[in-house]
Amino acid sequence: MSPANYVYLAALLFTIGAAGVLLRRNAIVVFMCVELMLNAANLTLIAFSRMHGNLDGQIMAFFVMVVAAAEVVVGLAIIVMLYRSRHSASVDDANLMKL
Amino acid sequence: MSALVAAGGVPGLWTLADGQKLQAPDIEYGKLSPTLIVLGAAAVGVVLEAFLPRRSRHVAQVFLALLGLAAAFAAVVGLAASGAGSTKAQIAGMGALAVDGPALFLQGTILLVGIVGVITFAERRLEPRAHGAPVDSFAAQPASVPGGEGEQMAVKAGWTTSEVFPLLLFAVGGMLLFPAANDLLLLFIALEVFSLPLYLLCALARRRRLLSQEAAVKYFLLGAFSSAFLLFGTALLYGYAGTVSYSGIARVVSGADATTDPVLAQTTGNDALLLIGGALVVMGLLFKVGAVPFHMWTPDVYQGAPTPVTGFMAAATKVAAFGALLRLLYVVLPGLRWDWRPVMWGVAILTMLAGAVVAITQTDIKRLLAYSSIAHAGFLLVGTIATSKDGISSVLFYLGAYSFVTLGAFSVVTLVRDAGGEATHLSKWAGLGRRSPLLAGVFAVFLLAFAGIPLTSGFAGKFAVFKAAAEGGAGALVVVGVIASAIAAFFYLRVIVLMFFSEPRADGPSVAVPSVLTSSAIAVGVVVTIVLGVAPQYFLELAGHAGVFVR
């Protein structure tokens, strides 16, 4: 199978993730959609790495995984903190500041 | 890595041919020393946090942070003095980092901003003493529920969040890498390294914790969203060029090397990869500089975050992100100039006008300064569009001038207080000039510098940026910029009029007497603002010498 198909799949996943961030209301689900976008980028990197026959893309995918893990640590801490003080993780409820 | 690939074929990717040796990377530790010192100090700070008793942590952390930042600044000055910024500019760290004029200039600026930031973080005299212990602007125990039992116990025990200093150092470390990044992987890593600590710092306010937490969530979700775009853009550019190094991509974009590689010929034949990839990466950076239409997070985060954090973030993030944006546009995508210039024109016009116009309607001083920072991002974009050496150096100068005005202005905001903490509503600032003329006068200096009135650093910076843009063929953009400046001047002057020419309110705020820390932070801001305004020549020349990117 041509590696290009993986790139199409990754683009699709990325779009699903981006749409999820914009449409979903629960902060945790929004965050999961961001992770989906990161993983779509990983898939793209690996597909292109295979196409070009060099390892740069695969090395980058490792770095992205580490960064995504660090982001989970920080993100979950912040979202859990929000949930504990408001008993809601909805991004619509976080509306104390407005124009 | 190239040695591995040279073995050829897919199995050759992960095996070494006979007699081939894996070469150890050659790292120029001297050239990387500023970043290494800062990140090393941050790691030591984490260890201190684990092993020192609570009461001695604050002093130790402040001392360590100042020492680390000062040592790193000395290293930057040493590198610049040895010619690393001009004649001996080079790519270091196996092609990952550029050590050149713009990188060193911006690193120096970020380190000075970091030092002033540490000073404002360390202020402990503004908040009333809690159970006899002096406290700073950060929550006693950020994990506890606001107003809950855990928080009361933490306050009673006199706990403080001294973790803010290592977090600040990690953020500064990432920011030092960001404008120096010379490949897209390091760009992404540096972005995350400085963003993650900032998300946390936003959540740590002692007062108005719900606002602070909300700001952190908004900043985090939008920041992670934008960095995912940046990463996907990186992946597409990698697909286009087969490499992530800036110079490698630039060569492929300009078509300098006639390629015999059939795969590369196929991917470079697909302009969609290049255009979409470039656009996504630029989008990620425009989010960080707070340019319209990616500015939505700015007012909320600036308002909700603890004010010392806001000042540090507003100044340092902008410096780092504009450095990275300049390098990306000038080193990676100069071959695409005719594609990105019209887009950046639109973004710059929107940013300047939206920032200036929406700021007029603001009633909160921190939100007002946030919209003002959006307008300033627009002015900086005007200089970026010049695509000339003058454009680079004028943006460098503007960043240096702007960051100290911002730090000073937010430090002043920390001083105007009432029973609920900082009195940020503009109506409470009425008549401040009659009650405390010195503080109001200092704030007026900062506002005049924001507005770009002559004899302040703001004027010198704006003049340099507009001049470079006009010479670079963006005359119409300069006209829009001047109009936006005039609109912006209106609301800055309105605050000055409010402070000096209206009656003080009976229930108005009082001005806290700061310790020597915040006083010196404000004094640095005033001195830099006036020196850069009255005698900008030396610093303009310094920025002029620093205005060449190494490729």
Image (spheres, rainbow, N blue to C red):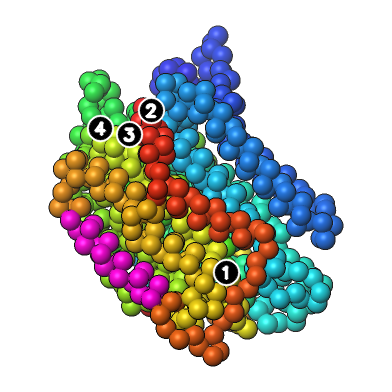
Disc 2 from disc 4: Cα separation = 17 Å
> Can you tell which of label 4 and label 3 is closer to the viewer?
3
Disc 4 from disc 3: Cα separation = 11 Å
Q: Count every numbered label the image shows and give the total.
A: 4
Percent x, y of residue A63: 52, 42
Q: Nearer the viewer, residue B3 or B118?
A: B118
Query: Which quarter of the figure has residue B144?
Result: bottom right
The answer to which of marks 2 and 4 sits earlier in the sequence is 4
Residue B492 highlighted magenta (yes or no): yes
Residue appearing at x 35%, y 49% in the figure: B461
Report the span colored magenta. B479-497
The reply to whether residue B303 is in sight is no
Q: Residues within 10 Å of mark 2 (few under 14, many from 20)?
A: many
Residue appearing at x 49%, y 70% in the figure: B440
Residue wearing tag 2: B550
Q: Are marks 2 and 4 in contact (CB under 8 Å)?
A: no
- Provide the chain ID for the residue under circle 1: B
The reply to whether residue B335 is in sight is yes
Amino acid type of the residue that numbered disc 2 sits on in the rendered structure: Val
Residue wearing tag 4: B253
Disc 1 from disc 3: Cα separation = 40 Å
Q: Nearer the viewer, residue B48 or B395?
A: B395
Dot 3: element:
helix
Drawn side of residue B309 relative to residue A57, left or right: right
Q: Residues within 10 Å of mark 3 (few under 14, many from 20)?
A: some
Percent x, y of residue B181: 45, 37
The answer to which of marks 2 and 3 sits earlier in the sequence is 3
Q: Which residue ends up furthest to the bottom in the rendered image? A: B506
**Residue B535, above or below B80:** below
Residue wearing tag 3: B331
